[in-house]
Amino acid sequence: MSDAAIISILLVTAIVHASWNAALKAGSDRVLDMAAMRSFGLVFALVVIPFAPLPAPAAWPPLIASAIAHMVYFGCLISSYQRGDLSQVYPIARGSAPLLVALSAYLALGETPTPLGLIGVVVISLGIIIAGTGAFRQNLHAIGFALLTGLSIASYSLLGGIGVREAGTIIGYAAWLELLTCAPFIAFAVYRRRTHVVAYLPSPAAQRGFVLGIGSTVSYAIVLWAMTLLPLATVTATRETSAIFAALAGTLLMKEPFAGRRIVAAACVTGGIGLLVFG
């Protein structure tokens, strides 16, 4: 499969990612909403693990570390959405990750993007960061949690790329990652919101979360697959174009402000993707 085809598939996963984030932001109980989304991941893991190959021993340290980074990501993401708009939080969180991944992949794996590919990573990141600046100037707590979210994204992306390449099995790696990520978070959510769980379970929000979790789980498995075929920086930067879709969702569905800088950001992202594909 060509690099352009893989990147096209990753763009679809970006739309899926923006969709479940928009739903999470719009929800009234984000902890339980996230747990509902992760519940499909847990079901997926329990069904697949008995039949999938076990990841190679070398894959387990980055796998476990990636699971921890994912749990930090969930916490920081929820905290960000409690303090800022979707069209503000999401671009900063996702936009800070590609540069961190590109730098880390270079230092840890020796991956050097082509000159045009590197420019593409920078341009995409610049566009996404532009999309999120402005209104954040008076919301330092939101900035802080968004940047921590970006750091956790970069961490689990780098660790995931290392782990899945060592695992020898994409499906087995994905299943164990879901188990180690989803089970602890769901347990935490049930404990944290224990007085609300019984009323939440039959609600439309719980059902919606489970369905969105299907897209989340499948799309990340696709990302892991792409990481075995493309440089980590390319995979991460392409996926982070979801920030533009999230900005549109925040504007059109949630009536959040959408300044002219978002148009510039969209142009940057589009140009950056072109550099990644054809560089």
Image (cartoon, rainbow, N blue to C red):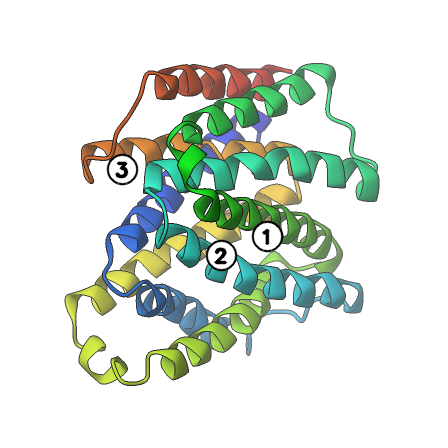
- Mark 2 Cα shell of 10 Å, populated few (<14), some (14-19), many (≥20): many
- 2 vs 1, front mark: 2
> Dividing the image into 4 quarters, which one contains the C terminus?
top right
Please report the residue visible at 16 percent of the width from the left and 66 percent of the height from the top.
204
Residue identified by numbered label 2: 76
Please report the residue visible at 64 percent of the width from the left and 69 percent of the height from the top.
53
208 with respect to 228 (left or right): left
Residue identified by numbered label 1: 152
273 with respect to 164 (left or right): left
Looking at the image, is 131 positioned above or below residue 149? above
* Quarter of image, res 121: top right
For the residues labelled 2 and 3, the Cα–Cα distance comes to 19 Å
Please report the residue visible at 37 percent of the width from the left and 69 percent of the height from the top.
35
Query: Amino acid type of disc 2?
Result: Cys
Query: Amino acid type of disc 3?
Result: Gly
Q: Which mark is on residue 250? A: 3
First reached walking from the N terminus: tag 2 or tag 3:
2
Secondary structure of residue under mark 2: helix
